[in-house]
Amino acid sequence: MDGPRILHLYVSGGHNFFGHHGRAPDAHPAVERVVARCVAGRGLEGDRFFAHEPGHKGQVTFFADEVYEDLCATLNVHDRPASVFRRNVVTRGLDLSALIGAEFALQGVRFLGVSECAPCHWMNGAFHPEAETRLRGRGGLRAKILSDGELSVGAVRLEILAAAAGKP
């Protein structure tokens, strides 16, 4: 498995944690797909954040499998899938932090890396009591979708279309 890859694609039709402050989480499943349809300015078809609000910075979220594996090993958690983190695209071999502020393409779909997908306290219940703390600075990437297209599980070629400010 050489080179960058998309390992998993997830969508969920409802919010389990977002907007649930002070209430118990819901139980909308993260549905794994082999292909996910990206719609520019709107999000992933079938996902809870699809057409959430104009300019939403989390139209799609990315998470590194390397971080997931490190958490599993460090916290000795082996019974929770990566889907519990509620990120849409689980990657391997991509430096997601380097894409903050960059315009990039994967499998012909253009994105704008907006910010870290910061961890929240809900992850402590969904994964492990130390998850939020251990994920700070590596919780993934929030991005806007700039062009329509499809992402699929498998090999990807990262194209940097416009580097982040202050980065070569």
Image: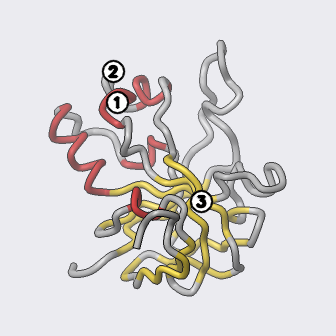
Per the image, label 1 sits on a secondary structure element best described as helix
Per the image, label 2 sits on a secondary structure element best described as loop
- Contact (CB < 8 A) between labels 1 and 2? yes
Between 130 and 141, the one lying in front of the other is: 141
Between 167 and 77, the one lying in front of the other is: 167
The amino acid type, in three-letter code, at marker 2 is: Pro
In the image, residue 153 lies at what x, y percent? 44, 75
In the image, residue 55 lies at what x, y percent? 78, 56
Disc number placed over residue 131 in the picture, else none: 1
**Quadrant position of residue 25:** top right
The amino acid type, in three-letter code, at marker 1 is: Ala
Whole-angstrom CA distance, mark 1 to mark 2, is: 6 Å
Q: Quickly name the residue at label 3.
A: 143
- In primary-sequence order, the first of circles 3 and 2 is 2
Relative side of 111 to 119, left or right:
right
Residue occupying the point 51% across, 84% down:
107
